[in-house]
Amino acid sequence: MSPRLNRELILERPMRVADGAGGFESSWHALGILWAEVSPGRAGLHDRAGLSAHRQTLKIIVRGAPPGASNRPQPGQRFRDGERIYLIESVQEDDASGRFLRCRAREEVMA
């Protein structure tokens, strides 16, 4: 059964930008729009720097792309869904044909 690619996500990669004072700031650069199927995984609370954070793992399926292609997600990149951010942790082919990629991602929301 083929996945239902019914969510429009923006694929972003991190960039280092000079801050004008000899250092760098991190920012995100949009690579393009990918249609995806987003499925929830485990959820839970954890402590982060003394604050409670809700962490949700997600399975995100997108169309396949060859290694090195700009539209192939990579760990360390992220998906943006409006105000929601999904940090990509792993990417692998979803099946032997390589028609789809399965991304494991996480969303954290500070409580």
Image (cartoon, rainbow, N blue to C red):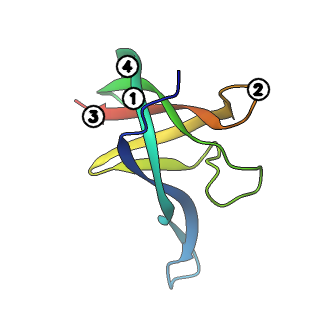
Q: Nearer the viewer, mark 1 or mark 2?
A: 2
* Label at residue 110: 3
* Label at residue 48: 1
Disc 1 residue type?
Answer: Arg
92 and 26: which one is in front? 92
Q: Nearer the viewer, mark 3 or mark 1?
A: 3
Tell me if label 3 and label 1 are in contact, CB under 8 Å: yes
* Label at residue 96: 2
Instruction: Check the image and report above or below for 64 versus 55.
Output: below
In the figure, is residue 81 to the left or right of 99?
Answer: left
The residues bearing labels 4 and 3 have C-alpha atoms spaced at a distance of: 10 Å
Q: Residue furthest front?
A: 1
Query: What residue is at 63 percent from the left and 42 percent from the top?
Result: 75
State the SS at label 4: strand
Labels 4 and 3: the sequence-earlier one: 4
The residues bearing labels 4 and 2 have C-alpha atoms spaced at a distance of: 36 Å
- Which residue is labeled 4 in the image? 46
Disc 2 residue type?
Answer: Ala
95 and 32: which one is in front? 95
Query: What residue is at 29 percent from the left and 34 percent from the top?
Result: 109
Tell me if label 1 and label 4 are in contact, CB under 8 Å: yes
State the SS at label 2: loop
Query: What residue is at 66 percent from the left and 38 percent from the top?
Result: 99
Tell me where residue 77 appears, x and y as whole percent. Answer: 56, 49
The residues bearing labels 1 and 2 have C-alpha atoms spaced at a distance of: 38 Å
